[in-house]
Image (tube, rainbow, N blue to C red):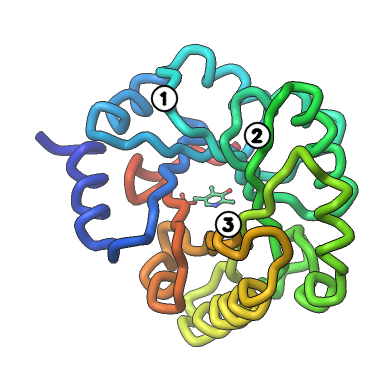
Amino acid sequence: MGGIADRIQTLKRSLPAGVSLVAVSKTRSLDEIMEAYNAGQRLFGENRVQELANKAPLLPVDIEWHLIGHLQTNKVRQVIRYVSMIESVDSLRLLSVISSEAVRAGRVTDCLLQVHIAEEEAKSGFDRKEIEQINWSEVIKSVPGVRIRGLMGIATFTEDEQKIRSEFGHLAALFSLLKTNFPGSNRLFNVLSMGMSGDWRIAVSEGSTMIRVGTIIFGERIKH
Ligand SMILES: *Cc1c(COP(=O)(O)O)cnc(C)c1O
């Protein structure tokens, strides 16, 4: 044994019940993904449309693919048939395009609203205030092709644990606030995706229900 399968099993053993693991497979080969698959992993995350559209048709159909990277509206059509969830919805316009494309494909697509919690300017997402102010009942009526399942966030890349904890804490607070009276079915709004290789323990202790982890499963990535 050893390698990917072992690392997945070890990680799964240390996750509390109710926290799911998205194996982030961007830049990884089909063989590496199959190694994880053969270890029982079914949930994978990709951050690029083209890469997802290239890989998905070549891999088992019972893999659930999450798109976790920025999505341009003109690329929604390319991924809609492959994704079980789009975690990186960062505008109402994108939400609306996803809905139209999902309806067109005869689907309903699960989505998470990405919230900007890090200090870096570059990270995309809704502002926390914006999320609180949007009239979600109105929005939901206009997007029959999507189900808003919860929130996703990326913390600042830093050694400062207090800072990471506070960013995740803010996101978790916003999540519980919305969860209490999110329109539609409350029970559906139940996913809080936060935590990556470097900060998943902090995320889980702050209430994450879904971590997105690549490096500690597959090893260091060559940047792309
Ligand atoms: C790459 C990526 C991850 C995983 O990062 P690791 O540090 O390799 O665990 C998680 N979330 C998003 C949005 C990513 O782009």
- From the Cβ of disc 2, is ligand 1 less than 8 Å away? no
Question: Which badge, 1 or 2, comes first in the chain's sequence?
Answer: 2
Which of label 1 and label 2 is nearer to you? Answer: 1
Considering the numbered disc 2 on the image, is that residue within a helix, a strand or a loop?
loop
Question: Which residue is the site of mark 3?
Answer: 188
Query: Which is more toward the observer, 171 or 132?
Result: 132
| Residue 135 higher or lower than 25, as above or below | below
Question: Which residue is the site of mark 2?
Answer: 48
Question: Which residue is the site of mark 1?
Answer: 62
Query: Which is more toward the observer, 167 or 171?
Result: 171
| Residue 77 higher or lower than 44, as above or below | above
Question: Which badge, 2 or 3, comes first in the chain's sequence?
Answer: 2
Q: Amino acid at mark 1?
A: Asp
| Residue 189 found in image quarter | bottom right
Question: Which badge, 1 or 3, comes first in the chain's sequence?
Answer: 1
| Residue 63 found in image quarter | top left
The residue that appears at 81% across and 78% down in the rendered structure is: 129
The residue that appears at 86% across and 43% down in the rendered structure is: 96
- From the Cβ of disc 1, is ligand 1 less than 8 Å away? no
Considering the numbered disc 1 on the image, is that residue within a helix, a strand or a loop?
loop
Instruction: Count every numbered label the image shows and give the total.
Output: 3
| Relative horizontal placement of residue 113, taking residue 173 as reference (left or right) | right
| Relative horizontal placement of residue 154, taking residue 19 as reference (left or right) | right
Residue 158 lies, in percent from the top left, at 53, 73
Which of label 2 and label 3 is nearer to you? Answer: 3
User: Which residue is the extreme one toward the left?
Assistant: 1
Considering the numbered disc 3 on the image, is that residue within a helix, a strand or a loop?
helix
The crowding category of the residue bearing disc 3, from other C-alpha atoms within 10 Å (few below 14, some 14 to 19, many at least 20), is some
* Cα–Cα gap, marks 2 and 3: 26 Å
